[in-house]
Image: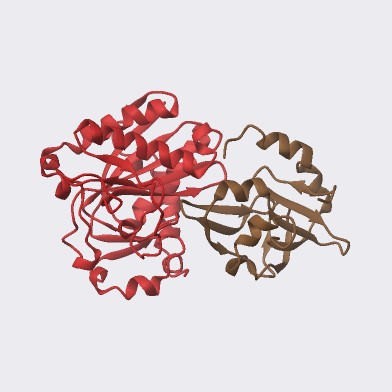
């Protein structure tokens, strides 16, 4: 059974601590968990080993707060996205390798978008992953969509990227579904989101979208799902709070 | 491959050396499963670790994974060539792709690890 929380907004430190806590709870309980959340302020999350100096050198993201994720990959500008964190015990068949869970999450969301008439697919062309920003990169399995009325091409915009932290007993995969270009950062850090590419999606209820996704994702994970009442950050506040200090420590942000 | 090599369930291997030290690396299976390695964080020489504790991290295009110490002890050397030549992990995981050398606190801890046959059986049905 996949348990799901709709967590609302929090700052970067709270969100990263909660994501890691999600992994600990999934490992202990032996069941997959997922939470959806937003950001209380414009935030750029850096990959685990991206250089802080490189982030500081980009004027277009200077106004945003910075937080470092436990996962890898490129920097994500948050604030106009729907972010998720999915935790799966490593004993689960989809927890055993990185690509399996990545593909499962992205394929099932692509399927939901295809149901809305959108040409959504997983990127399968040669990767280019040297850019600092996640949504400027393309790797196998990234979710890309063609703009309304356009035929799919290798240059289709990426609307969801994910990354994992593989803990001792669980995998935490978090990612962002980019909804619209972020007006809180400069043009070099803005990327077209789902609503920019498909204007008819502006009226889409995000929780309904998440529910449709969970229905497919839970089946891929081998079971059902249910929405939990309240927030994960409240239900498992001790787990999350125990990790908050580590993510708030300036040494974590400046580790590289 | 040396017969006395042991494996942790978390896919690190350890091989006792003649000088009382032990060499630690990552199994060929794990390296293949990680795919597309992009960065590695090695531990500091002199650091003490406990069995099962993270001593380093490795990043692939999709994931960051911890490396876990198979036994407790003091890290006495690290393979400084690795971060610049991550392909060594795949080309020669039990040789030039070694990660660190440790001075075990208690060599008997190795008896709790898997031998080659048991490790191979544990990963046999695990998909890549």
**What shade has chain A been given?**
red
Q: Please tell me how many numbered marks the rendered image carries.
A: 0
Residue name at image x 26 percent, y 71 percent: A62
Residue name at image x 28 percent, y 35 percent: A230
The chain assigned the colour brown in the figure is B
A63 or B60: nearer the viewer: B60
Q: Quadrant of the C terminus of chain B?
A: top right
| Image position, residue A99 (x, y; %) | 48, 43
Q: Is residue A235 visible?
A: no
B75 or B92: nearer the viewer: B92
Residue A152 placement, left or right of A98: left
| Image position, residue B124 (x, y; %) | 67, 34
Residue A115 placement, left or right of A254: left
Q: Is residue A134 visible?
A: yes
A75 or A67: nearer the viewer: A75
| Image position, residue A175 (x, y; %) | 35, 48
**Against A31, is A8 above or below?**
below
Residue A169 placement, left or right of A236: right
B120 or B106: nearer the viewer: B120
| Image position, residue B58 (x, y; %) | 55, 57
> Which quadrant of the structure image shows residue A74?
bottom left
**Against A217, is A238 above or below?**
below
Toward the top, the furthest residue is A223
**Against A220, is A160 above or below?**
below
Residue name at image x 88 percent, y 61 percent: B18
Toward the right, the furthest residue is B18
Residue name at image x 79 percent, y 58 percent: B105
């Amino acid at each position: 059974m996949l348990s799901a929380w709709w967590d609302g907004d929090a700052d970067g430190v709270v969100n990263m601590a909660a994501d890691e806590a999600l992994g600990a709870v999934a490992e202990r309980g032996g069941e997959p968990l997922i939470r959806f959340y937003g950001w209380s302020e414009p935030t750029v999350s850096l990959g685990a080993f991206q250089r802080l100096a490189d982030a500081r050198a980009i004027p277009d993201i200077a106004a945003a707060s910075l937080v470092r994720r436990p996962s890898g990959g490129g920097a994500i500008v948050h604030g106009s996205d729907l972010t998720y964190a999915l935790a799966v015990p490593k004993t689960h068949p989809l927890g055993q390798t990185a690509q399996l869970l990545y593909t499962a999450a992205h394929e099932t969301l692509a399927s939901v978008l295809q149901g809305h008439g959108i040409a959504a697919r997983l990127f399968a062309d040669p990767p280019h992953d040297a850019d600092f920003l996640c949504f400027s990169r393309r790797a196998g399995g990234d979710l890309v969509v063609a703009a309304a009325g356009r035929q799919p091409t290798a240059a289709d915009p990426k609307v969801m990227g994910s990354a994992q932290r593989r803990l001792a007993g669980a995998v935490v995969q978090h990612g962002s579904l980019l909804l619209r270009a972020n007006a809180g950062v400069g043009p070099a850090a803005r990327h077209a989101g789902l609503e920019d590419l498909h204007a008819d999606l502006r009226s889409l209820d995000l929780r309904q979208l998440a529910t449709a996704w969970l229905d497919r994702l839970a089946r891929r994970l081998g079971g059902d799902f249910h929405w939990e009442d309240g927030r994960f950050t409240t239900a498992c506040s001790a787990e999350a709070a125990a990790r908050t200090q580590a993510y708030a420590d300036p040494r974590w942000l400046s580790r590289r | 491959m040396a017969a006395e090599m042991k494996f942790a369930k978390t896919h690190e291997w350890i091989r006792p050396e003649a000088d009382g030290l032990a060499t630690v690396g990552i199994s060929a299976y794990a390296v293949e499963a990680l795919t597309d390695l992009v960065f590695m964080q090695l531990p500091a020489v002199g650091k003490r670790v406990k069995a099962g504790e993270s001593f380093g991290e490795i990043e692939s295009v999709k994931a960051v994974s911890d490396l876990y110490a198979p036994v407790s002890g003091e890290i006495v050397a690290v393979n400084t060539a690795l971060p610049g030549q991550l392909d060594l992990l795949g080309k020669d995981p039990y040789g030039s792709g070694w990660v660190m050398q440790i001075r075990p606190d208690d060599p008997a801890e190795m008896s709790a690890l898997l031998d080659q046959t048991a490790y191979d059986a544990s990963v046999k049905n695990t998909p890549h």
